[in-house]
Amino acid sequence: MHSFFRFVQTEEPSGLFHFQKVIAIPTKKAVKPLVEHLTPGAMKILLEQPERSCQKGRRDLTLMSVMYDTGARVQELIDIKVSDVILENPAVIVLTGKGNKTRRVPLLKNTVSLLERYITENRLDKQWKNDYPLFTNNMKNKLTKEGIAYIIVKYVESARRSSTLVPSKVKPHMFRHSKAMHLLQAGVNLIYIRDFLGHVDIKTTEIYARTDTETKRKAIENIYPDLIDSNLPDWNRDQALLSWLSELK
């Protein structure tokens, strides 16, 4: 509304006084939601769920590993083509994000191994399959957002049978948030995390720094001396106090 009336006041100066009153209305303050993410332990448990002895399980493991390792948005993951996967050293995946902007994201060695086996098993290493989607459903069509959400929910339910570390609701975008938080906790500079995630503005990336209270606590402990003495005398040995307490009966 503010933007609209800023525009209107330049087009219709006669109503400037009334438009200014609208613009002066303060913006409603709302509580900013915390960034939902998984701990490293919870992510490890979740990635252990797919059955590696069957082809679909291997696909799901590779898909979730790539989604976490690259911090890809769900649509970016869906749009990955075989030609976007470069496994020669240094291994990277080319992601196409918002505004059709591309970025090259490095891959860790375990994810590279999964991708090599997945591409070979599904015979995607042929030149004429370069434009094929990397991940497909049972009909060999490109996966949908709903399809990826279904895969994650399935393994969340499986993980929760043996552990409470994994929350009951895990959305696909939480993989991206989790990667960003884990990079931050590992000491990676926000500038690198911004480029890794494909953010245009560093302010978008700063939400992870505001959320990560554990990193803040460790930083404060490293910088400031411990001035507060937590050692307290044992009141059981204070005879004067014990005598006073006994008189209260």
Image: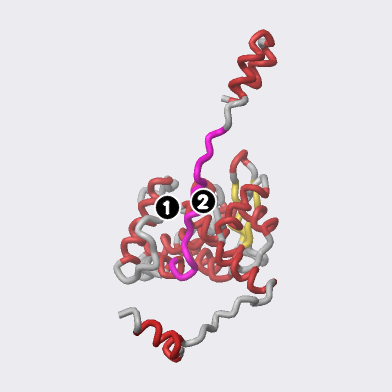
Q: Is residue 39 highlighted in magenta?
A: yes
Local SS, label 1: loop
Q: Position of residue 90 (x, y in %)?
A: 67, 65
Q: Position of residue 182 (x, y in %)?
A: 56, 64
Q: Residues within 10 Å of mark 2 (few under 14, many from 20)?
A: many
Local SS, label 2: helix
Question: Quick check: 56 left or right of 177?
Answer: left
Q: Would you place residue 90 above or below residue 128 in this image?
A: below
Q: Is residue 23 highlighted in magenta?
A: no
Residue drawn at 66 percent across, 10 percent down: 12
Quadrant occupied by the C terminus: bottom left
The disc at residue 90 is: none
Q: Would you place residue 188 above or below residue 138 in this image?
A: below
Q: Position of residue 169 (x, y in %)?
A: 37, 55
Question: Quick check: 110 left or right of 162?
Answer: right
The disc at residue 77 is: 2
Q: Amino acid at mark 1?
A: Lys
Which one is nearer the viewer's eye here, 125 or 28? 28
Residue drawn at 64 percent across, 69 percent down: 220
The disc at residue 171 is: 1
Quadrant occupied by the N terminus: top right
Q: Position of residue 241 (x, y in %)?
A: 43, 85
Q: Which residues are magenta?
A: 27-42
Q: Is residue 188 visible?
A: yes
Q: Amino acid at mark 2?
A: Leu
